[in-house]
Amino acid sequence: MNSNQPEDLAQLMAQASRVLARLEAWLPPAPPPTDWSAQAYRWRKRGASGWLEAVPRVSAIALDDLRHVERQKEILDRNTRHFVAGKPANNVLMTGARGTGKSSLVRAMLLTYASQGLRLIEVDKEDLGDLPEIIDLIVARPERFIVFSDDLSFETGEAGYKALKSVLDGSIAAADDKLLIYATSNRRHLMPEYHSENLQSTMRDDGEIHPGEAVEEKVSLSERFGLWLSFHPFRQNDYLDIVAHWVKELGGADDGNQPWRMEALQWALERGSRSGRVARQFARDWVARLA
C-alpha cells in the first residue's frame, strides 16, 4: 500500500489543480492598478470589486466658454480654489434647468486647477455606496479629489443615499481635506416628493409648522451640501449671445449681422429649450454646413 502513496498523491494534486482552474474561470479578474498620472477617473465595478479607471482624454471646456452663469462660475471657482489651496471648502449641489452648464462648470474646474493637483472622479449614482472604498484609495494621495455625480436623484430606500449622507456629514473615515462632492440634479431635494407626505405635517397652536418625517429626511440630504447653486433658463438674447460665441470658437465667419439668428431661434424652438447645450449644438451644425 505504501508503494502507491506517491501515485495517489499525484492524482490528488492533479484533481485539485483541475478544480482550482475551474474556480478561477468563474472568479472575476483582479482590478487593474490605478494610473495615478491621470487627471480624471471613472469608478468602475465588476462584481464586488471596484477600481478607478483613468480617463485618457477629458472633454475639457474653459471657464470663458461658459457664459451668462457668472455668479455660479465665481462661487464654484472660489470654492475650488480654496479646496486646492488646502483651505476649508464646501460640497456643492447644482440644480436647475438642463443644459445650462452645470456639469460643464465642473469640467472647467478640472481644466483650471489640474496643474495644481486637482483630480476628478466620476461616480454613477448606483455606485455611491462605494464612497468609503474610494476614500480608502485616495486618502494617502497628495492630490485633491472632487467626486462628481451627474443627474443625481434618489428613490426611497436606495443604497447610495445613506453612503452619500454619511460622507457629507463627515464620518470618522471621511477624508475631509482630500475630497469634495460636486453633484448636479434637476431636483432641489434629490428625492421625489409626494402629496401624501405633506399630509404628515402638523401645525401647533401658535401656527408653527412641523413637516412630516419623510419630508424632513428628504430635505436633510440636500442641506448637507454647503453650497447650493441654481441655474435658470436663458433669455433669448443670452441664448443668441452663446450661439455667437460658439460660432466664432468653431471657426465660423460672422460679420456681426448674425445671419444664423432665425435658424438658431427655430432650432431652440424645435427642442423646447434655449440652453447653452442647444446653442452649441446649433453652432456645430451651422459651421459644418458652411465649411
Image (spheres, grey):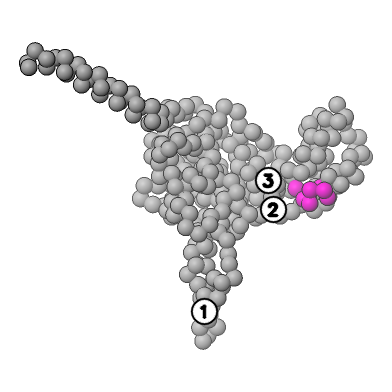
Q: Secondary structure at mark 1?
A: strand
Q: Position of residue 64 (x, y in %)?
A: 71, 39
Q: Position of residue 195 (x, y in %)?
A: 59, 70
Q: Nearer the viewer, residue 191 or 67?
A: 191
Name above or below for residue 96 compared with residue 25. Answer: below
Which numbered tag is attached to residue 43? Answer: none
Asked if residue 29 lies left or right of residue 259, the reply is left
Name the residue beneath numbered marker 3.
Answer: 101
Identify the residue shown where x is 34% and y is 26%.
Answer: 22
Magenta part of the chain: 268-275
Asked if residue 78 lies left or right of residue 132, the reply is right
Label 2 is placed on what type of residue? Ala
Q: Label 1, label 3: how many angstroms apart (C-alpha)?
A: 39 Å
Which numbered tag is attached to residue 202? Answer: 1
Can you tell which of label 1 and label 3 is closer to the viewer? Answer: 1
Can you tell which of label 2 and label 3 is closer to the viewer? Answer: 2
Identify the residue shown where x is 54% and y is 40%.
Answer: 122
Name the residue beneath numbered marker 2.
Answer: 97
Sequence-first disc among 2 and 1: 2
Q: Position of residue 193 (x, y in %)?
A: 58, 64
Label 3 is placed on what type of residue? Gly
Q: Nearer the viewer, residue 26 or 212?
A: 26
Q: Residues within 10 Å of mark 2 (few under 14, many from 20)?
A: some
Q: Position of residue 155 (x, y in %)?
A: 53, 57
Judge whether residue 150 can be spotted in this image. yes
Image quarter where the N terminus lies is top left
